Amino acid sequence: MTKKQRAELVQIELEKLYPTTPVPLDHTDPYTLMVAVALSAQTTDKKVNQVTPYLFEVAGTPQRMARLEEFEIKELIKEIGLSNTKAKNLKRMAELLLERHNGIVPQTYEELEALPGVGHKTASVVMSQAFGFPAFPVDTHIHRLMTQWKLTSGKNVVETEKDAKAIFPEESWNKLHLQIIFYGREYSPARGKGEKDFLTKMMFDK
């Protein structure tokens, strides 16, 4: 099976499995999505979704987040990993949104990635899921599966993102990156043995 055929198989099978792709992180607007994604680094989406309802009730806008002290934000997110750093980032992120963007989440990678706690992956999620720009955010699930499926030889998520964008049609990116994440969680968890990973078997078992 060629690389192109493997990529087509991925799209066909994942579309059957996941015809709809709700964003795994609960949010109500671009700002709360950006906060949720920033909080999800080295933390499960499930844990983030447990913490954010009250966080957003108290500080669901940049204006309200900026008014809080760092220690108050930390108290609200203390169950999440790296809460010290994330509290500091959330406060400064809110302040810079107010200073630079009138409290509105910007719609360019350069402006997003200039905000504390917003790396390329977070910016890509916001650009694709909040604003509809074609993007292919790569997390550890996608990097691992793309490597497993021999669709990338990337040593890191940056190279894997480049390869994903080259092999999959642009119009599929925003949906497909979520489909791969869902598949990884259900059929090929990082700590499992991948017994349920039927896509890899379809590609490589003779």
Image (cartoon, rainbow, N blue to C red):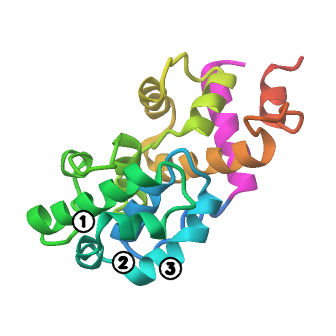
Query: Contact, CB < 8 Å: mark 2 with mark 3?
Result: no
Q: Which residue, as the protein is rendered here, is positioned at the far front?
A: 71
Q: Callout 3, which amino acid?
A: Tyr
Q: Quick one: label 1, few (<14), some, or many (20+) residues within 10 Å?
A: many
Please state the extent of the stretch shown in magenta in the rendering: 1-18
| Label 2 or label 1, whichever comes before in sequence order | 2
Residue highlighted by disc 1: 94
Task: State the residue at coordinates (75%, 54%).
Answer: 17
* C-alpha separation, residue under disc 1 versus residue under disc 3: 17 Å
Would residue 48 be found to the left or right of residue 198 on screen?
Answer: left
Q: Looking at the picture, how far across and down is residue 27, in whole percent? A: 47, 72
Q: Is residue 146 in sight in this rendering? A: yes
- Disc 2 secondary structure class: helix
Give yes or no for residue 4 being in the magenta stretch. yes
Q: Looking at the picture, how far across and down is residue 5, in whole percent? A: 66, 27
Q: Nearer the viewer, residue 167 or 28?
A: 28
- Give me the disc on residue 54: 3
- Disc 3 secondary structure class: helix
Q: Nearer the viewer, residue 43 or 186?
A: 43
| Label 2 or label 3, whichever comes before in sequence order | 3
Q: Quick one: label 3, few (<14), some, or many (20+) residues within 10 Å?
A: few
Q: Looking at the picture, how far across and down is residue 116, in whole percent? A: 27, 50
Residue highlighted by disc 2: 59
Number of numbered discs present? 3
Q: Callout 1, which amino acid?
A: Ala
* C-alpha separation, residue under disc 2 versus residue under disc 1: 10 Å
Task: State the residue at coordinates (80%, 43%).
Answer: 187
Query: Contact, CB < 8 Å: mark 2 with mark 1?
Result: yes
Quarter of the image with the C terminus is top right
Would residue 36 be found to the left or right of residue 187 on screen?
Answer: left
Q: To which quarter of the image does residue 106 belong?
A: bottom left
Q: Nearer the viewer, residue 75 or 122?
A: 75
